[in-house]
Image (cartoon, rainbow, N blue to C red):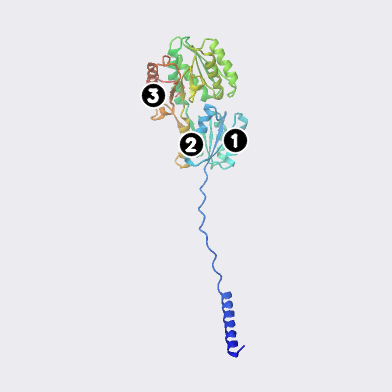
Amino acid sequence: MAPQRHHLWFILVLAVAASLVLAGCAAPAAPATEAPAAPAAESFKVGLVHPSPITDSWSGLAYAAQQRAQAELGAEIANVQVGDPAGYEKAFSDFGSQGFNVVIGHGFQYDDAAAKVAPQFPNTYYVIVNGSSVGPNLTGINTIPGYVQIMYAAGMLAGKMSKTHKCAAFTLELPATKLPNEGFIAGFESVPGNECSLVTLNDQNDVGAAKEAALQAMADGADILSANANLAGSGVWQAVAEQGGDSVYAVGTVGDVNAQAPKNMLFSLAQDVPTSIFNAVKAIKEKTIEPGSAIELRLENPGDLAAYPIVFNPDLDPSIMTDELKAELQANIEKISSGEIKVQGAE
Protein backbone atom coordinates (compact mmCIF):
# COMPACT_ATOMS: atom_id res chain seq x y z
CA MET A 1 0.00 0.00 0.00
CA ALA A 2 1.29 3.47 -0.86
CA PRO A 3 2.43 5.59 2.11
CA GLN A 4 -0.20 8.31 1.46
CA ARG A 5 -3.02 5.80 1.33
CA HIS A 6 -1.73 4.15 4.45
CA HIS A 7 -1.78 7.50 6.25
CA LEU A 8 -5.39 8.26 5.19
CA TRP A 9 -6.59 4.83 6.30
CA PHE A 10 -4.95 5.31 9.70
CA ILE A 11 -6.69 8.69 10.16
CA LEU A 12 -10.12 7.17 9.24
CA VAL A 13 -9.69 4.36 11.78
CA LEU A 14 -8.83 6.89 14.53
CA ALA A 15 -11.93 9.00 13.69
CA VAL A 16 -14.26 5.99 13.92
CA ALA A 17 -12.72 4.90 17.21
CA ALA A 18 -13.06 8.40 18.65
CA SER A 19 -16.73 8.55 17.70
CA LEU A 20 -17.37 5.24 19.41
CA VAL A 21 -15.65 6.42 22.59
CA LEU A 22 -17.69 9.63 22.63
CA ALA A 23 -20.89 7.70 22.09
CA GLY A 24 -20.06 5.48 25.05
CA CYS A 25 -19.52 8.48 27.27
CA ALA A 26 -22.80 10.17 26.35
CA ALA A 27 -25.61 10.18 28.92
CA PRO A 28 -28.10 7.32 28.38
CA ALA A 29 -31.42 8.30 26.79
CA ALA A 30 -34.29 8.75 29.27
CA PRO A 31 -36.82 5.91 29.14
CA ALA A 32 -40.21 6.71 27.59
CA THR A 33 -42.65 7.85 30.25
CA GLU A 34 -46.19 6.41 30.49
CA ALA A 35 -49.21 8.55 31.27
CA PRO A 36 -50.28 8.05 34.89
CA ALA A 37 -53.19 5.59 35.20
CA ALA A 38 -56.57 7.11 36.04
CA PRO A 39 -57.55 6.40 39.63
CA ALA A 40 -59.96 3.48 39.93
CA ALA A 41 -63.55 4.47 40.62
CA GLU A 42 -64.47 3.94 44.23
CA SER A 43 -66.73 0.91 44.55
CA PHE A 44 -70.20 1.20 46.04
CA LYS A 45 -71.52 -2.09 47.42
CA VAL A 46 -75.11 -2.77 48.44
CA GLY A 47 -76.05 -5.95 50.31
CA LEU A 48 -79.50 -7.37 51.01
CA VAL A 49 -80.74 -9.68 53.77
CA HIS A 50 -84.22 -11.00 52.99
CA PRO A 51 -86.57 -13.54 54.64
CA SER A 52 -87.93 -15.43 51.63
CA PRO A 53 -86.91 -16.16 48.03
CA ILE A 54 -86.44 -13.05 45.89
CA THR A 55 -89.14 -14.45 43.61
CA ASP A 56 -91.63 -13.88 46.44
CA SER A 57 -93.61 -10.64 46.15
CA TRP A 58 -92.26 -9.25 49.45
CA SER A 59 -88.55 -10.03 49.10
CA GLY A 60 -88.79 -9.18 45.41
CA LEU A 61 -89.50 -5.56 46.33
CA ALA A 62 -86.11 -5.13 48.00
CA TYR A 63 -84.36 -7.01 45.22
CA ALA A 64 -85.92 -4.64 42.67
CA ALA A 65 -84.49 -1.69 44.61
CA GLN A 66 -81.10 -3.38 44.70
CA GLN A 67 -81.16 -3.94 40.94
CA ARG A 68 -82.06 -0.30 40.39
CA ALA A 69 -79.08 0.72 42.54
CA GLN A 70 -76.91 -1.46 40.33
CA ALA A 71 -78.26 0.09 37.12
CA GLU A 72 -78.40 3.74 38.18
CA LEU A 73 -75.74 4.06 40.87
CA GLY A 74 -73.23 1.53 39.56
CA ALA A 75 -73.54 -0.52 42.74
CA GLU A 76 -72.09 -3.97 43.23
CA ILE A 77 -74.86 -6.09 44.76
CA ALA A 78 -75.17 -9.31 46.73
CA ASN A 79 -78.04 -10.85 48.67
CA VAL A 80 -78.65 -13.63 51.17
CA GLN A 81 -81.87 -15.25 52.35
CA VAL A 82 -81.98 -15.57 56.15
CA GLY A 83 -85.18 -16.73 57.80
CA ASP A 84 -83.71 -18.12 61.03
CA PRO A 85 -83.23 -15.43 63.73
CA ALA A 86 -80.03 -17.19 64.80
CA GLY A 87 -78.42 -16.05 61.55
CA TYR A 88 -79.48 -12.40 61.51
CA GLU A 89 -76.45 -10.87 63.24
CA LYS A 90 -73.99 -12.99 61.26
CA ALA A 91 -75.53 -11.90 57.96
CA PHE A 92 -75.21 -8.21 58.88
CA SER A 93 -71.69 -8.71 60.25
CA ASP A 94 -70.56 -10.58 57.14
CA PHE A 95 -71.61 -7.73 54.88
CA GLY A 96 -69.97 -5.20 57.21
CA SER A 97 -66.68 -7.08 57.35
CA GLN A 98 -66.66 -7.33 53.54
CA GLY A 99 -66.78 -3.55 53.27
CA PHE A 100 -70.31 -3.11 51.96
CA ASN A 101 -71.42 0.53 51.97
CA VAL A 102 -75.13 -0.20 52.49
CA VAL A 103 -76.92 -3.25 53.86
CA ILE A 104 -80.70 -3.55 53.53
CA GLY A 105 -82.57 -5.68 56.05
CA HIS A 106 -85.93 -6.37 54.43
CA GLY A 107 -88.26 -6.74 57.37
CA PHE A 108 -89.07 -5.61 60.90
CA GLN A 109 -87.61 -8.85 62.29
CA TYR A 110 -84.07 -7.67 61.45
CA ASP A 111 -84.31 -4.46 63.49
CA ASP A 112 -82.70 -5.63 66.75
CA ALA A 113 -79.87 -7.49 65.01
CA ALA A 114 -79.00 -4.48 62.86
CA ALA A 115 -79.05 -2.16 65.88
CA LYS A 116 -76.55 -4.45 67.61
CA VAL A 117 -74.22 -4.89 64.63
CA ALA A 118 -74.26 -1.35 63.17
CA PRO A 119 -71.94 0.24 65.79
CA GLN A 120 -69.29 -2.39 64.96
CA PHE A 121 -69.11 -1.24 61.32
CA PRO A 122 -69.34 2.57 61.27
CA ASN A 123 -68.52 2.72 57.55
CA THR A 124 -71.50 0.54 56.64
CA TYR A 125 -75.00 2.05 56.63
CA TYR A 126 -77.81 -0.30 57.63
CA VAL A 127 -81.34 0.30 56.28
CA ILE A 128 -84.15 -1.76 57.84
CA VAL A 129 -87.51 -1.85 56.10
CA ASN A 130 -90.22 -1.36 58.75
CA GLY A 131 -87.55 -1.03 61.41
CA SER A 132 -87.73 1.57 64.16
CA SER A 133 -84.14 1.74 65.40
CA VAL A 134 -81.97 4.67 64.30
CA GLY A 135 -78.34 5.64 64.76
CA PRO A 136 -75.40 7.36 63.03
CA ASN A 137 -75.34 4.58 60.41
CA LEU A 138 -78.78 3.02 60.91
CA THR A 139 -82.21 4.05 59.66
CA GLY A 140 -85.65 2.54 59.23
CA ILE A 141 -88.14 2.88 56.40
CA ASN A 142 -91.52 2.46 58.06
CA THR A 143 -94.14 1.57 55.45
CA ILE A 144 -96.61 0.14 57.96
CA PRO A 145 -98.74 3.22 58.87
CA GLY A 146 -99.68 3.99 55.27
CA TYR A 147 -100.30 0.34 54.48
CA VAL A 148 -102.61 -0.06 57.48
CA GLN A 149 -104.58 2.89 56.14
CA ILE A 150 -104.85 1.60 52.58
CA MET A 151 -105.82 -1.86 53.86
CA TYR A 152 -108.56 -0.29 55.98
CA ALA A 153 -110.00 1.41 52.89
CA ALA A 154 -109.90 -1.89 50.99
CA GLY A 155 -111.58 -3.66 53.90
CA MET A 156 -114.40 -1.13 53.86
CA LEU A 157 -115.11 -1.89 50.19
CA ALA A 158 -114.71 -5.67 50.62
CA GLY A 159 -117.11 -5.51 53.56
CA LYS A 160 -119.73 -3.95 51.33
CA MET A 161 -119.18 -6.53 48.59
CA SER A 162 -119.33 -9.64 50.81
CA LYS A 163 -122.46 -11.76 50.50
CA THR A 164 -121.80 -13.94 53.56
CA HIS A 165 -120.56 -11.02 55.70
CA LYS A 166 -117.50 -13.10 56.61
CA CYS A 167 -113.86 -12.76 55.67
CA ALA A 168 -110.48 -14.20 56.67
CA ALA A 169 -107.12 -12.40 56.72
CA PHE A 170 -103.92 -14.45 56.85
CA THR A 171 -100.82 -13.15 58.59
CA LEU A 172 -97.56 -14.00 60.32
CA GLU A 173 -96.62 -13.15 63.89
CA LEU A 174 -94.86 -9.99 62.70
CA PRO A 175 -96.05 -6.38 63.08
CA ALA A 176 -95.29 -5.66 59.42
CA THR A 177 -97.82 -8.29 58.31
CA LYS A 178 -100.18 -8.36 61.29
CA LEU A 179 -100.96 -4.63 61.59
CA PRO A 180 -102.04 -4.19 57.94
CA ASN A 181 -104.25 -7.27 58.23
CA GLU A 182 -105.81 -5.82 61.37
CA GLY A 183 -106.47 -2.64 59.39
CA PHE A 184 -108.23 -4.70 56.71
CA ILE A 185 -110.34 -6.47 59.33
CA ALA A 186 -111.31 -3.17 60.97
CA GLY A 187 -112.40 -1.79 57.60
CA PHE A 188 -114.40 -4.94 56.81
CA GLU A 189 -116.12 -4.88 60.19
CA SER A 190 -116.98 -1.18 59.84
CA VAL A 191 -119.96 -2.51 57.87
CA PRO A 192 -122.62 -3.54 60.42
CA GLY A 193 -123.10 -7.30 60.76
CA ASN A 194 -119.70 -8.23 59.29
CA GLU A 195 -117.08 -10.34 60.99
CA CYS A 196 -113.56 -11.23 59.91
CA SER A 197 -111.10 -13.70 61.40
CA LEU A 198 -107.33 -13.21 61.67
CA VAL A 199 -105.47 -16.42 60.87
CA THR A 200 -101.82 -16.54 61.98
CA LEU A 201 -99.59 -18.88 59.96
CA ASN A 202 -96.55 -20.49 61.55
CA ASP A 203 -94.20 -20.58 58.55
CA GLN A 204 -93.80 -17.74 56.07
CA ASN A 205 -92.63 -20.19 53.39
CA ASP A 206 -95.18 -22.99 53.90
CA VAL A 207 -97.48 -22.50 50.92
CA GLY A 208 -99.28 -25.81 51.48
CA ALA A 209 -100.27 -25.02 55.08
CA ALA A 210 -101.57 -21.60 54.04
CA LYS A 211 -103.63 -23.18 51.26
CA GLU A 212 -105.24 -25.65 53.69
CA ALA A 213 -106.03 -22.84 56.13
CA ALA A 214 -107.63 -20.84 53.32
CA LEU A 215 -109.75 -23.78 52.19
CA GLN A 216 -110.95 -24.20 55.78
CA ALA A 217 -111.87 -20.52 56.01
CA MET A 218 -113.86 -20.83 52.79
CA ALA A 219 -115.62 -23.91 54.18
CA ASP A 220 -116.51 -21.86 57.26
CA GLY A 221 -118.28 -19.29 55.10
CA ALA A 222 -115.67 -16.60 54.34
CA ASP A 223 -116.23 -15.23 50.85
CA ILE A 224 -113.49 -12.57 51.01
CA LEU A 225 -109.89 -13.60 51.73
CA SER A 226 -106.73 -11.56 52.05
CA ALA A 227 -103.18 -12.43 53.02
CA ASN A 228 -100.04 -10.58 54.03
CA ALA A 229 -97.78 -13.52 54.80
CA ASN A 230 -94.74 -13.41 52.49
CA LEU A 231 -94.41 -16.51 50.30
CA ALA A 232 -97.09 -18.41 52.24
CA GLY A 233 -99.64 -15.92 50.96
CA SER A 234 -99.50 -17.56 47.53
CA GLY A 235 -101.15 -20.61 49.11
CA VAL A 236 -104.20 -18.45 49.89
CA TRP A 237 -104.36 -17.26 46.29
CA GLN A 238 -104.13 -20.85 45.07
CA ALA A 239 -107.07 -21.89 47.24
CA VAL A 240 -109.23 -19.02 45.97
CA ALA A 241 -108.25 -19.61 42.34
CA GLU A 242 -108.98 -23.34 42.50
CA GLN A 243 -112.05 -23.44 44.75
CA GLY A 244 -113.47 -19.92 44.79
CA GLY A 245 -115.71 -20.36 41.76
CA ASP A 246 -117.92 -17.32 41.31
CA SER A 247 -118.61 -16.79 45.01
CA VAL A 248 -115.24 -16.28 46.79
CA TYR A 249 -112.89 -13.39 46.05
CA ALA A 250 -109.54 -12.14 47.26
CA VAL A 251 -107.76 -8.87 47.89
CA GLY A 252 -104.07 -9.11 46.98
CA THR A 253 -101.31 -7.47 48.97
CA VAL A 254 -97.71 -6.27 48.81
CA GLY A 255 -97.35 -6.51 45.04
CA ASP A 256 -99.40 -7.14 41.92
CA VAL A 257 -100.60 -10.71 42.52
CA ASN A 258 -103.69 -10.53 40.29
CA ALA A 259 -102.33 -13.22 37.96
CA GLN A 260 -102.27 -15.75 40.81
CA ALA A 261 -106.08 -15.78 40.93
CA PRO A 262 -107.11 -14.04 37.67
CA LYS A 263 -110.83 -14.78 37.95
CA ASN A 264 -111.14 -14.14 41.68
CA MET A 265 -108.74 -11.34 42.64
CA LEU A 266 -110.65 -8.09 43.11
CA PHE A 267 -107.48 -5.98 43.05
CA SER A 268 -103.97 -5.89 44.46
CA LEU A 269 -102.74 -3.39 47.03
CA ALA A 270 -99.19 -2.97 45.82
CA GLN A 271 -96.39 -1.19 47.63
CA ASP A 272 -93.78 0.94 45.90
CA VAL A 273 -91.26 -0.07 48.52
CA PRO A 274 -88.49 -0.33 45.89
CA THR A 275 -88.58 3.42 45.30
CA SER A 276 -88.44 4.16 49.05
CA ILE A 277 -85.46 1.83 49.49
CA PHE A 278 -83.67 3.16 46.40
CA ASN A 279 -84.12 6.77 47.54
CA ALA A 280 -82.56 5.90 50.91
CA VAL A 281 -79.63 4.11 49.24
CA LYS A 282 -79.09 7.04 46.86
CA ALA A 283 -79.14 9.52 49.76
CA ILE A 284 -76.53 7.45 51.57
CA LYS A 285 -74.27 7.33 48.50
CA GLU A 286 -74.61 11.08 48.01
CA LYS A 287 -74.23 11.72 51.76
CA THR A 288 -77.50 13.65 51.93
CA ILE A 289 -79.27 11.43 54.46
CA GLU A 290 -79.69 12.92 57.91
CA PRO A 291 -77.98 10.64 60.48
CA GLY A 292 -80.32 9.36 63.16
CA SER A 293 -83.43 10.00 61.08
CA ALA A 294 -86.23 7.57 60.21
CA ILE A 295 -88.46 7.52 57.15
CA GLU A 296 -92.20 7.03 57.74
CA LEU A 297 -94.84 6.70 55.03
CA ARG A 298 -98.51 7.54 55.66
CA LEU A 299 -101.41 8.78 53.55
CA GLU A 300 -101.52 12.22 55.15
CA ASN A 301 -98.02 13.01 53.88
CA PRO A 302 -97.94 14.68 50.46
CA GLY A 303 -96.68 12.24 47.88
CA ASP A 304 -96.86 9.12 50.06
CA LEU A 305 -100.11 7.95 48.48
CA ALA A 306 -98.09 7.08 45.37
CA ALA A 307 -96.23 4.50 47.46
CA TYR A 308 -99.41 2.41 47.70
CA PRO A 309 -100.74 1.93 44.17
CA ILE A 310 -103.94 -0.05 43.62
CA VAL A 311 -103.76 -2.47 40.69
CA PHE A 312 -107.20 -3.51 39.49
CA ASN A 313 -107.43 -6.99 37.98
CA PRO A 314 -107.83 -6.73 34.18
CA ASP A 315 -109.09 -10.33 33.97
CA LEU A 316 -111.89 -9.94 36.50
CA ASP A 317 -115.47 -9.79 35.26
CA PRO A 318 -116.18 -6.02 35.11
CA SER A 319 -119.65 -6.59 36.56
CA ILE A 320 -117.99 -7.61 39.84
CA MET A 321 -115.62 -4.67 40.29
CA THR A 322 -117.65 -1.87 38.71
CA ASP A 323 -116.52 1.68 38.05
CA GLU A 324 -118.82 2.78 40.90
CA LEU A 325 -117.05 0.47 43.34
CA LYS A 326 -113.63 1.65 42.15
CA ALA A 327 -114.73 5.25 42.73
CA GLU A 328 -115.98 4.34 46.20
CA LEU A 329 -112.61 2.82 47.08
CA GLN A 330 -110.88 6.01 45.95
CA ALA A 331 -113.31 8.10 48.01
CA ASN A 332 -112.53 6.02 51.11
CA ILE A 333 -108.80 6.60 50.57
CA GLU A 334 -109.32 10.35 50.19
CA LYS A 335 -111.30 10.48 53.44
CA ILE A 336 -108.41 8.78 55.24
CA SER A 337 -105.86 11.09 53.63
CA SER A 338 -107.81 14.17 54.71
CA GLY A 339 -108.25 12.89 58.27
CA GLU A 340 -112.00 12.53 57.96
CA ILE A 341 -111.59 8.80 58.71
CA LYS A 342 -109.16 7.89 61.48
CA VAL A 343 -107.58 4.46 61.28
CA GLN A 344 -106.56 2.78 64.50
CA GLY A 345 -103.11 1.22 64.30
CA ALA A 346 -101.78 3.85 61.89
CA GLU A 347 -100.97 6.46 64.53
Image coordinates of residue 181 in percent, x first then y, are 50, 20
- Which sits in the foreground, 179 or 62? 62
* Residue under the image location 52 percent in, 45 percent down: 43
As rendered, which of 1 and 161 lies closer to the eye? 1
User: What's the amino acid at mark 2?
Assistant: Arg
Query: In this rendering, which labeled residue sits more in front, label 3 or label 2?
Result: 2
Q: Secondary structure at mark 1?
A: helix
> Which element is circle 2 on?
helix
Distance from label 3 to label 2 (Cα)?
30 Å
**Depicted 74 relative to depicted 343: above or below:** below
Left or right: 321 in relation to 61: left
The x, y position of residue 128, in whole percent, is: 52, 33
**Residue beneath label 3, please?**
337
Residue 146, position as x, y percentages in the image: 44, 25
Of the image marks 3 and 2, the number of the one nearer the N terminus? 2
Residue under label 2: 68
The residue depicted at 51 percent of the width and 25 percent of the height is: 176
- Whichever of labels 2 and 1 marks the residue nearer the N terminus, that label is 2
Spatial CA distance of label 2 from label 1 is 22 Å
**Amino acid type assigned to the residue bearing label 1 in the image:** Ala
In front here: 295 or 226? Answer: 226
Whether label 1 touches label 3, CB < 8 Å: no
- In the rendered view, would you say 162 is above or below 171? above
Q: Amino acid at mark 3?
A: Ser
Q: Is residue 26 left or right of residue 307?
A: right
Marking on residue 91:
1
Within 10 Å of disc 1 (Cα), the crowding (few <14, some 14-19, many 20+) is many
Q: Is residue 42 above or below residue 315?
A: below
Mark 3: secondary structure: helix
